[in-house]
Image (spheres, rainbow, N blue to C red):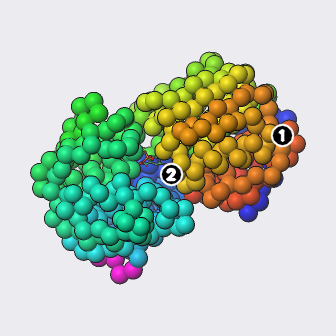
Amino acid sequence: MQRSVSSPASISGNLSVPGDKSISHRSLILNSVARGDALVTGLSSGEDVMSTMGCLQAMGVEIEPGVEPGTVIVHGTERGLQEPDGILDAGNAGTSMRLLSGLLAGQPFTSVLTGDASLRSRPMGRIVQPLKQMGAQIMARKDDTLAPLTIRGGSLRGIEYTMPVASAQLKSCIMLAGLSAEGDTILHQPALSRDHTERMVSAMGGTVISDGLTLVVQPSQLNAVDIAIPGDISSAAFWLVAGLCHPQARVLVRGVGLNPSRTGILEALEAMGAGDALQLVDQRDEGGEPVADLLVTSTQLSGTEIEGDLIPRILDEIPILAVAACFAQGDTVIRDAGELRVKESDRIATTVSELTRLGASIEEREDGMVIHGTGGLKGGGCESHLDHRLAMALGVAGLLAEGETTINGAEDASISYPDFWEHLDLLSGE
Ligand code: S3P
C-alpha cells in the first residue's frame, strides 16, 4: 500500500495508542503456562501480538475474546502445552520467536518455528547457544543461527550466562527456560533492557531476584494474573515528535506506559530542549506499571547525543528520533546502537537512506548516525523496507515536510499499530 502525506496547517487532537506490544506478548505467553485463568485488557491488536496468539492456540491454549475490544481471557494450561501439529509461524515478530523458543525449550515435544523473510534473516544464534547449554536440542539454518528453528524440548538445567547483548528478548527467552529448569539460572546483562518479564513473573508468584545487572531466576510454577496493559510508548513517540516539531500543534496521548526501562525517548526529547512543550499529565500506577497522559505542543528542538546505557531504553524510537533531529537546530549524534542493524530492517541503513531521500543531511556510522539539523525535510518518495517503525517514522516526516511525501509499504504499520494512518488523518483534521 502506498500512502501520500502532506503537512497540515495544524496537528491537534486527543488519542489513545495501542496497548504496549512487549507487555501484550508477555501477558499471553506467561498466562498460557500459568495455573488458572486471566483477563487481559488493552491487548495490542498489532499483527505481531496476533502471531504470538496464533502460536499459543496451535499448542492447545484457549484464548477467548472478551466482551470489550482488546480484551481476552487466557485459560492457563499449568505448563501443559500440546505438541503443535504444524509449523509455528511467528510472522514478523522477533519477540514471538525468541520468547516462545525459551518456553518451548522446556516442553517435552518437538516444534518448528518460522517467520517471514525479515525474521528469517535475524540472529537466532544468540538464543540457540544458551538454550542448548541448558539442555534443549535445537537445530537451525546456517550453523544454528537462523530460523526456522527446530526445538526438541525437555528437562533443562539452570546455567550462569553472560549475555553478549543487552536484549530483552534474549533475557526473556532464557528466563522463560529458567522457570522450568532444575536449579537457578543466573544472567549477567551488559546494560539494562526492558524489564516487563521480570515484573510479570514476580506478579505471578515466580521468583526473580535482580541485583544491578544480574538476575537470578528460580524454577517456579506461575499463577495466572489479570493484566491491564498501558498504551505503548513506542507508538506514542510518533505523535510526540509530530506535535513537538510541527509549528501549530497540540496533541494529547492518553494512558501511556512509562516503565523506566522504556522512557529513553522522553529523556532524549528533554535533552533536545522539549521543556514545557512535553508534559506528563495525571501520572498514576496501573497494573504495576507507571502510566501518564502525554501532552505535547510546538517547540524548537536542538541536537543531542544519544549513546551508552540509554540505547537499550530508546532502541525502537531511534527512527522517529532521527526525524525529530532533522528539525532540530544543530547536530544529533547516535552511537553504540549497532543492534539497530538486526531489527526488522537494518535500521541504521534504512533510516539514513530514506531520510536522505527526503532531503535530510545525515551520515551513516557503523554503530549509529549523525544528523545535521537543517530545520526541515522535503517531500518525496520513500520505502518502509518491510519495517513498521520506519513506515510510521516516514509518515510523521510527511506530516512535517514541505510538499508531498509518498510512503511505499505503508501497510507495515499494522505490525504494531493498525490504526496508525487513521490516527494520522485524525490529527491532521482530515
Ligand atoms: C522487545 C525488545 C526489544 C525491542 C523489541 C521488543 C521485547 O528488542 O526492540 O521491539 O518485547 O522484548 P531487544 O531484544 O533488542 O531488547
Q: Main secondary structure of the magenta part?
A: loop
Q: How many marks?
A: 2
In the displayed structure image, the side of residue 322 where residue 226 appears, left or right: left
Q: Residues within 10 Å of mark 1 (few under 14, many from 20)?
A: some
Residue 85, magenta (yes or no) = yes
Q: Residue furthest right?
A: 403
Question: For the residues carrying marks 2 and 1, which lies nearer the camera in this image?
Answer: 2
Instruction: Give the residue pinned by disc 1.
Output: 378
Say which residue appears at 52% left-offset and 51% top-offset: 343
Callout 2 secondary element: helix
Q: Which mark is residue 217?
A: none
Q: Quadrant of the N terminus?
A: bottom right
- Whether label 2 lies within 8 Å of ligand 1 gets the answer no
Location of residue 294 in the rendering, given as x and y in whole percent from the top left corner: 58, 31
Q: Tell me which segment is drawn in magenta.
A: 81-86
Q: Which mark is residue 342?
A: 2
Measure the alpha-carbon separation of dots 2 and 1.
28 Å
Q: Is residue 379 magenta?
A: no
Q: Please state which of residues 90 and 74 is positioned toward the viewer in this rendering.
A: 90
Badge 2 amino acid: Val
Indicate left or right for 336 with 171 as reference.
right
Position above or below: 383 against 146: above
Say which of 363 and 93 sits in front: 363
Residue at the extreme left of the image, as rendered: 183
Q: Quick check: can you spot residue 19?
A: no
Crowding at label 2, few (<14), some or many (≥20) Cα neighbours within 10 Å?
Answer: some
Q: Position of residue 366 (x, y in %)?
A: 56, 40
- 89 vs 42, nearest the viewer: 89
Q: Secondary structure at mark 1?
A: loop
Q: Is residue 192 above or below residue 341?
A: above
